[in-house]
Amino acid sequence: MPQGRKAIEWAKATDWNVTPHELNPYDYPDMEDGIPLHVRQTV
């Protein structure tokens, strides 16, 4: 499980197909945590 910021880096590398929450629900408990606002608005 990637810790902290590393989960965001991995999610970004997948073009946000995998979210930080899916990679590490302990650090990112909300489904949208760690996802940039401009990405959230396109979903």
Image (cartoon, grey):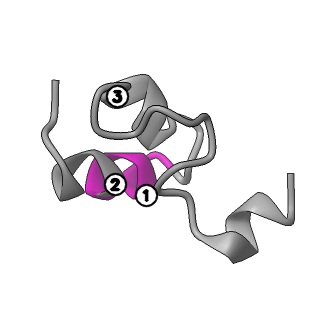
Mark 1 highlights which residue? 12
What is the three-letter code of the residue carrying label 1? Lys
- Residue at the spot 70% in from the left edge and 65% down from the top edge: 39
Residue 7, image x and y in percent? 27, 45
Instruction: Tell me the distance, in whole angstroms, between the alpha carbons under discs 1 and 2.
Output: 6 Å
Mark 3 highlights which residue? 23
Instruction: Tell me the distance, in whole angstroms, between the alpha carbons under discs 2 and 3.
Output: 9 Å
What is the three-letter code of the residue carrying label 2? Ile
Residue 10, magenta (yes or no)? yes
- The local crowd at label 3, few if under 14, some if 14 to 19, many if 20 or more residues have their Cα within 10 Å, is some
Mark 2 highlights which residue? 8
Secondary structure under the numbered disc 2 in the rendered image: helix
Q: Are discs 1 and 2 less than 8 Å apart at CB?
A: yes
Q: Indicate which disc, 2 or 3, sits on the residue closer to the N terminus.
A: 2
The span shown in magenta is 9-14
Instruction: Tell me the distance, in whole angstroms, between the alpha carbons under discs 3 and 1.
Output: 12 Å
